[in-house]
Image: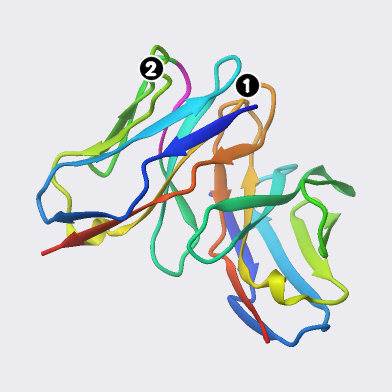
Amino acid sequence: SQTIHQWPATLVQPVGSPLSLECTVEGTSNPNLYWYRQAAGRGLQLLFYSVGIGQISSEVPQNLSASRPQDRQFILSSKKLLLSDSGFYLCAWKGGGADQPQHFGDGTRLSIL
Amino acid sequence: GNSVTQMEGPVTLSEEAFLTINCTYTATGYPSLFWYVQYPGEGLQLLLKATKADDKGSNKGFEATYRKETTSFHLEKGSVQVSDSAVYFCALMSYNTDKLIFGTGTRLQVFP
């Protein structure tokens, strides 16, 4: 069966520090991969998605970037964090097929001080 | 563009009450429709889905029917439990994209 892992589960970082969040998927190949952000008490905002190695689409201009160095690895990064980057970050994967759902990881709660 | 509208919460119910969370959508073509649930401090879990008109998705006592004539996908459960307390998200995926569009979520609180 397929599983998705995100780490770390929680992170507290000072303003201006760098960020690296990692997401890996097991049990499938060539998945679509997604990064979402959920601000406190609000819905989900799609940040990035990828249909293959090295292929990244950005949905909103921001202080963050994403990379996909391997088929089942998706990394969210920042060179300098802002206070507004605080939130709950979720990674998701989707298999082939137009009606297949996305499956989510457990998320990373990021607090910027 | 495509969008999803959910009823605002919180929805507060007593245990064993009947639940309805309304969801309507706007989309071109024939989207797939999903309900996700998010328990406190966790990621989203797929609850159920429907991929064409008149399909009924069901799981864990929850049901939702894809109504194309009313562009709705309302979530229902006949008898809620305290353990159902969570945030519920309605979402659609258009036929020509692999991206989900979410509603804003509805918080359900069930009291004993």
Q: Is residue B16 left or right of residue A45?
A: left
Residue A50 lies, in percent from the top left, at 78, 45
Residue drawn where x is 28% and y is 33% of the image = B63
- Specify the principal SS of the magenta part: strand
Name the N-terminal-most of marks 1 and 2: 2
Q: Is B108 left, or right, of B46 in this rendering?
A: left
Q: Nearer the viewer, residue B69 or A100?
A: B69
Q: Nearer the viewer, residue B4 or B82?
A: B4
Which chain contains the residue that carries disc 1?
B
Label of residue A84 in the image: none
- The quarter of the picture where residue A90 lies is bottom right
Q: Which residue is more in the foreground, B84 or B26?
A: B26
Residue B19 in the image: above or below residue A67: above
Looking at the image, the residue that sits furthest to the top is: B69
Task: State the separation of the CA atoms marked 1 and 2.
Answer: 19 Å
Picture coordinates of residue A35, whole percent (x, y): 69, 55
Q: Which residue is mark 1?
A: B95
Is residue A35 shown left or right of residue A9? right
Q: Is residue A90 magenta?
A: no
Magenta span covers which residues? Answer: B48-52
